[in-house]
Each structure stands twice: as structure tokens, then as C-alpha cells.
Image (cartoon, rainbow, N blue to C red):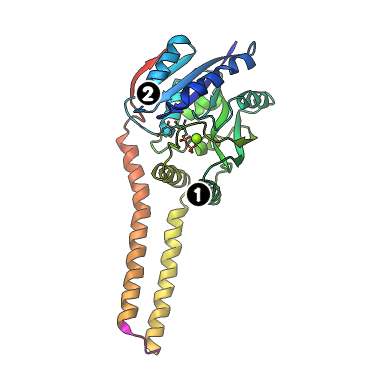
């Protein structure tokens, strides 16, 4: 029988993980006679009791596999490790907090049988998330879409179902700054959305504070677009014409010279810093690629 690997990144989820495992194990019933299931939990350096709970569950069920990272490497690295170690014919990626209903993995499988290599969960609605989170996510997906030449689906996270062909192609991409929800569409393949309503987290708090959200957003933009550099170019043209206009005005009118000079200095200074900052983002990424460090370090694994 063919194998389905369900990949679950986990970071400090002691409040949810038992319930999540319970609901994920129920999928064995749904897939009975169709697919065998392995569950790959990637413990991303949790500091709470997550590792212990995962170990206890893995002892009871050999289909539960655990990869323990040596520290917190981030959600995108945890997903990448899951995909590296997966041997399945099909792979599903799902969060550990039950915001994405596990039962939909079966619907994704059925959809994939219609001839799709990728079936991605498209969020129609997000239940009980903060207005800030909803607004920033809504804005981000649209800004990203307008900046990339690639068709990255909007309102789509990492909850998705893929075939092993997609996994194999994905695993060839070893870039250090990862935006998995953009990297998978980049691969091509036939894909289809599965619309769903995103539930609220069953317990605990988001493990995506603003700093991690921003990192993910920048990785998405800088890894998939050169538009920020084009933006500097356009900005330089704008400041050039603004300076000419100010110079002409200064020549023909009685402006306060100090005010004009300090305004121009501030303007040019801040635009220079912005340009250096944008270039720095690309250069830092080149530096990370040339150092070629491993994406993550595994401390140990269970049942793998
Ligand atoms: N996660 C992770 N490493 C991190 C942060 C999060 O593995 O550094 C996991 C987390 O345990 C969850 C998933 O990534 O399974 C998504 O995180 P979360 O639900 O906190 O994000 P949100 O849904 O609030 O965007
Ligand atoms: Mg969540």
C-alpha cells in the first residue's frame, strides 16, 4: 500500500500536542485500505514538555516519528527537515495547533486523485485571530503577489498535500532563507486549492511573534523579487527631479536657505540609508548562501 507522511512542525506546543496527535491518529481510519500513514513531528527546539510528550507517543505507536532539533531553527526549517526525511508517496503538511482541520487531509487526497500534484489549503476565513494578524496577513499576501512574477496563491499558508514528485523537486532547493509557501508554487506542477475556514488555536499562544512574522515576510519578498532594487532606481530618479525643482525654486524665490539645505540633506541621507539597507538584505542573503551551513541540526530522532 502507498504511504502518506504527515509532517507536523512543533515548537513549545505542550498545551496542544496530545489533542493534535489524537485527532491526527483518527486519520488512520479514514485512510484504511487506501494509504498507510506515518506522522513526522519535528520538534523545533521546544523548551517546554513537548519533547517528552512526543517521545511517549512515539513509544506507543511506531508510525509516530520524531525529529528533535538541537535548538529553535524556525518553522520553515522544521518543514524542510520533515520533507528531507519523508519517504512517502504523498506528503501532507499541517500545523500542530489544529487551526487547520486534519480531516481535510482526506479531502486533499481525494482532490489530488483528480490529477493534481499539489492541493493547498486556501483560507476563506480566520476564526478568532487578532485584527492585526488578519489585516497584516491580508496585506502581505497581496503585496507579495504584486511584487513577484510568480503566481503565489493568496491567503495560503503551509497546509498542503503534495506528491512525492513535488517533494523530490523541492528537496533539491537548498536555499538558506526559506519561504516554503512560495518555493512550492515555484516548482510548477498541477495544483488546486481546497478552500477552508481556519479554526482558532486549540490552546497556547501563537509561536509567530511579530519578529518571526516579519522575517518570514522579508524572506518571501527578497527571495522571490528584485522589485525592491527597481524601487531604489525609481526613487533615485524622483529625488533627482525633486532636487532640480528645489534648486530652481531656490534660485528664483526667497526661500530660507538653511531650511532647504537641511531638508535636502535629510532626504538624500535617508534615501541613501534605505538603498543601503535594501542592498544589504540581498548581500546578507548571498553571504548566508556562500557560507553554506546546514539548514538545521538534528539532536536525535525516534522511530526514524
Ligand atoms: N513553529 C515551529 N517553529 C517556530 C514557530 C512555530 O515549528 O519557531 C510551529 C508551531 O508549533 C505550529 C506552526 O509552526 O505548529 C505554526 O505556528 P503558529 O500556529 O504559532 O503560527 P500562527 O498560526 O499563529 O501563524
Ligand atoms: Mg497556528
- Graded by Cα atoms within 10 Å as few (under 14), some (14 to 19) or many (20 or more), the crowding at tag 2 reads few
Residue annotated with mark 2: 49
Judging depth in this view, the residue of 237 and 42 nearest the camera is 42
Left or right of 152 in this view: 51: left
Is 175 placed above or below 67 here?
below
Q: Circle 1 — which element?
A: helix
Q: Which mark is residue 132?
A: 1
Left or right of 262 in this view: 222: right
State the image coordinates of residue 122 (x, y, percent, origin top left): 61, 37
Give the magenta range.
253-257
Q: Quadrant of the C terminus?
A: top left
Q: Which mark is residue 259?
A: none
Which quadrant of the view contains residue 297? top left
Is 81 placed above or below 193 here?
above
Which quadrant of the view contains residue 290? top left
Q: Residue furthest right?
A: 114
**Gap between marks 1 and 2 measured at Cα:** 30 Å
Q: Circle 2 — which element?
A: loop
Q: Main secondary structure of the magenta part?
A: loop
Residue at horizontal 40 percent and vertical 35 percent from the top: 175
Q: Is residue 236 visible?
A: yes
Judging depth in this view, the residue of 2 and 63 nearest the camera is 63
Residue at horizontal 35 percent and vertical 38 percent from the top: 289
Earlier residue among tags 1 and 2: 2
Amino acid at each position: 500500500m502507498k504511504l502518506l507522511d504527515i509532517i507536523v512542525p512543533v515548537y513549545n506546543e505542550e498545551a496542544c500536542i496530545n489533542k493534535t496527535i489524537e485527532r491526527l491518529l483518527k486519520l488512520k481510519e479514514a485512510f484504511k485500505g487506501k494509504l498507510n500513514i506515518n506522522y513526522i513531528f519535528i520538534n523545533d527546539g521546544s523548551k517546554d514538555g513537548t519533547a517528552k510528550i512526543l517521545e511517549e507517543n512515539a513509544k506507543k505507536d511506531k508510525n509516530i516519528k520524531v525529529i528533535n532539533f538541537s535548538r529553535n531553527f524556525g518553522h520553515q526549517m522544521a518543514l524542510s527537515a520533515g520533507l528531507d526525511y519523508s519517504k512517502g508517496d504523498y506528503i501532507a503538511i499541517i500545523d500542530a495547533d489544529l487551526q487547520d482541520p486534519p480531516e481535510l487531509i482526506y479531502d486533499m487526497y481525494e482532490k489530488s486523485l483528480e490529477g493534481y500534484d499539489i492541493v493547498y489549503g486556501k483560507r476563506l476565513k480566520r476564526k478568532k485571530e487578532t485584527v492585526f494578524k488578519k489585516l497584516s496577513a491580508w496585506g502581505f499576501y497581496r503585496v507579495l503577489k504584486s511584487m513577484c512574477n510568480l503566481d503565489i496563491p493568496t491567503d495560503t499558508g503551509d497546509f498542503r498535500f503534495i506528491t512525492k514528485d513535488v517533494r523530490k523537486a523541492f528537496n533539491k532547493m537548498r536555499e538558506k532563507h526559506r519561504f516554503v509557501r512560495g518555493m512550492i508554487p515555484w516548482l510548477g506542477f498541477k495544483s488546486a486549492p481546497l478552500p477552508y475556514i481556519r479554526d482558532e488555536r486549540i490552546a497556547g499562544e501563537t509561536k509567530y511573534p511579530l519578529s518571526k512574522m516579519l522575517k518570514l515576510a522579508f524572506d518571501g519578498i527578497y527571495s522571490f523579487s528584485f522589485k525592491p532594487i527597481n524601487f531604489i532606481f525609481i526613487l533615485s530618479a524622483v529625488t533627482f527631479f525633486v532636487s532640480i525643482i528645489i534648486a530652481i525654486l531656490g534660485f528664483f524665490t526667497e526661500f530660507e536657505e538653511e531650511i532647504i539645505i537641511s531638508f535636502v540633506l535629510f532626504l538624500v541621507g535617508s534615501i541613501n540609508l534605505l538603498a543601503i539597507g535594501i542592498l544589504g538584505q540581498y548581500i546578507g542573503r548571498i553571504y548566508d548562501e556562500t557560507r553554506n551551513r546546514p539548514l538545521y541540526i538534528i539532536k536525535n530522532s525516534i522511530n526514524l
